[in-house]
Amino acid sequence: MKRAVVLLCGALLLPRNAAAEHTILAIPGITLGFITRYVAEDEGLWKKQGLEVDIRDIQGIGAINAVISGSVDFSMSSGPSINRAVARGQKLVALATALNQSDEDIVIRKEIADAAHLDLAAPLKERAQILKGRKIAIGGVAAIPDIVLKVIASQAGLAREDVVTTPMQAQETMAAFSTKAIDGFVSGPPFIQQAVLAGTGVILSDSAKGEPVEYSPVSAALLLARADFCGAHREICAKMVHGILEAARFVHEHPKETVAVMRKHFAAYDDKVLEASYPMLVAMTPVPPVTTPQMLENADLMNIVAGFMKPADKLARYDDFIDNSFTK
């Protein structure tokens, strides 16, 4: 009886707001480009605020479609994805840009690059000539890897049919690359670094350098929600964005700890691969993770060049669906 009374008293002493709020976040791919998500989760940056975040892995543009349908509250998608949705009348809001570059590099098999005497110091439009007739793996049709590939191929003067694209998930891509079933792939860390350190691949385009530079900066790993969500759930949005903000700071300030977080989620990869991924992530992770109209306009221009939007569909304004208030 005494123990029951003590437990009851203890329960009565808990703060009235002790119950955690819940939300659902969709992630469109398994890469280290979503490092802020991994850090926020593993370091308890959301939990410390009383927010329980249920993570759902939904490949490619399926993540943003899940937000639109209302089956999840947030996704970390890309500037091109949100722009296409808004142009089609979907009311969404950009809350935080966790990466200010695409985070998507084109990697070509080294033996192909060597046989073509590829000059990696040449302008990108010259380097990209090597893509003609090649089979390249992308994360998903109309997703950011596909867009980056089509933009760079277009800059090289290649027609759409000059490059064969095949949608694959990351693990399938790396297996196909090792067996030479594909000539290259478009992806982010740690897959880029794995191929480079293994000596099997070379980086054709480098997003850490802003390539393609004509469309830099561009919003990626973009936290977004339905336009009416934060009005009804302001505390959830504030906590969600604050977790991303604190995670971005953590990435910059704690390199060893950040690599440890990487190791937890990418245990199959050598420490050298993960350590080589870190500088790329730091270079692209803005603090604070604000979204600018320029980032989204560049995303629109990429959509147009890639053939996923008509020039007439380019948005006139971008401020209307950007909310940076939670990043302050």
Image: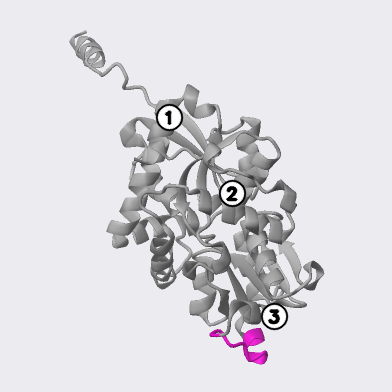
Mark 3 crowd level (few <14, some 14–19, many ≥20, 10 Å Cα): some
Residue name at image x 30 percent, y 62 percent:
256
What residue does disc 2 label? 28
Place of residue 246 in the rendered image (x, y in percent of width and height, measured from the top left)? 33, 46
Residue marked by disc 3: 129
Tell me the amino acid under the disc marked 1: Ile
Between 125 and 52, the one lying in front of the other is 125
Report the mark closest to the observer, 2 or 1.
1
Of the numbered discs 2 and 1, the one sitting upstream in the chain is: 2
**Labels 2 and 1 touching (C-beta < 8 A):** no
Up-down relation of residue 43 to residue 175 (above or below): above
Alpha-carbon neighbours of circle 1 within 10 Å: few (<14), some, or many (≥20)? many
Range drawn in magenta: 111-121
* Residue 52 on image: x %, y %: 42, 33
Residue holding disc 1: 236
User: Looking at the image, which is closer to me, 310 or 228?
Assistant: 310
Whether residue 114 is visible: yes
Q: How many marks?
A: 3
Q: Earlier in the sequence, mark 2 or mark 3?
A: 2
**Is residue 306 shown left or right of residue 234?**
right
Query: Which residue type carries mark 2?
Result: Pro
Please name the amino acid that badge 3 sits on. Gln
Circle 3 or circle 1, nearest the eye: 3
